Image (spheres, rainbow, N blue to C red):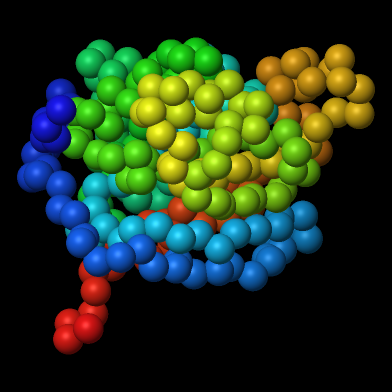
Amino acid sequence: MAPVSTQPSGASRVFGPPLRDPSPPRSCFLFPFCFGSQGHCEIEVERVVGPQFPWCRPQVAGLGNPGLPGTRHSVGMAVLGQLARRLGVAESWVRDRRCAADLALASLGDAQLVLLRPRRLMNANGRSVAQAAEMFGLTAEEVYLVHDELDKPLGKLALKLGGSARGHNGVRSCISCLNSSVMPRLRVGIGRPTHPNAVQAHVLGCFSPSELELLPPLLERAADLLLDHIRERSQGPLSGT
C-alpha cells in the first residue's frame, strides 16, 4: 500500500511524503549507565543499529490501558505525557477515531513527531499503532514503542532496536499488526514480584507511595533518552560525506 499523508482532526499542519535515506545503516550512540538524583534511575542503552531518517516523522507510542493511567502497566503512557510536556504539546492531544487513539503532533528540530496513546486495551494496542503508522505513511523502523518491563527493576530504562515481545502482550500486538519486530523500544522497569501468582495484580496495580517518589526523575530521563535518540536518527548525513 502506498504511503498516505493525512492530517488528524484539529491538527494545524499536514506533513508531506516521508523522506527516506538511501545510505546504509549506521551505529547510533551508546549511553553510559546513569543514575538519578536519588541514585535509583539507571539507563541502559544497547548498541542500536538502524537506518537514519533525515527530517523523519517518527511515531512514539506509549502502550497501556486507557482509563488506567496510574498503573504500572500503563507507565508507557506516563512517559508520553512527560514527552508531550517537554515538547510543549501537553494541551494538544486530539482523539482520532480512525486509529482509536489520542494523537499530538510536535516538532523536534527537523523531525516531526507523532505522539500516540492508544484508546484500545493493551492486548489490542497494536491496531491503533499500525493504523496511525499507515495514516502518516510510516514504516515499522519509524515507530517507537514505550512500555513497562517486568524483568527490569523500577528506575531502570533500556532502549533497544527490535526483538521479540518477551511476553509483553502490547508489544506482541504491535508486532502482529505491523508485521515486523524491528521497532525501537524503550522498556521502563517496573520490577517483578517474587511470587509468580502475583504478577497480574502487580502489573495492573498502582504504584506504591515510595515508588511514586521515583517516577518524576524516571519520566524525565525516559523523555531525555527518547529525544536524544530521535535527534541522532533524524540528523541527515553531513555535507560532503
Residue sitting at the far bottom:
240
User: Residue 9 appears in which quarter of the rendering?
Assistant: top left
Above or below residue 145? Residue 86 is: below
Q: Position of residue 25 (x, y in %)?
A: 36, 63
| x 73%, y 29%: residue | 207
Residue 13 lies left or right of residue 204; in this view the side is left
Above or below residue 81? Residue 58 is: below
Q: Position of residue 16 (x, y in %)?
A: 8, 45
Residue 128 lies left or right of residue 133; in this view the side is right
Residue 71 lies left or right of residue 122; in this view the side is right
The quadrant in which the C terminus is found is: bottom left
| x 33%, y 26%: residue | 130
Q: Position of residue 191 (x, y in %)?
A: 78, 36
Residue 41 visible, this angle: yes
Count every numbered label the image shows and give the total: 0
Residue sitting at the far front:
24
The quadrant in which the N terminus is found is: top left
Residue 110 visible, this angle: no
Residue 26 lies left or right of residue 208; in this view the side is left
Q: In this view of the protein, which residue sits in the foreground, 37 or 139? A: 139
Q: Position of residue 155 (x, y in %)?
A: 71, 48
Above or below residue 192? Residue 154 is: below
| x 52%, y 15%: residue | 123
Q: In this view of the protein, which residue sits in the foreground, 138 or 119? A: 138
| x 66%, y 26%: residue | 167
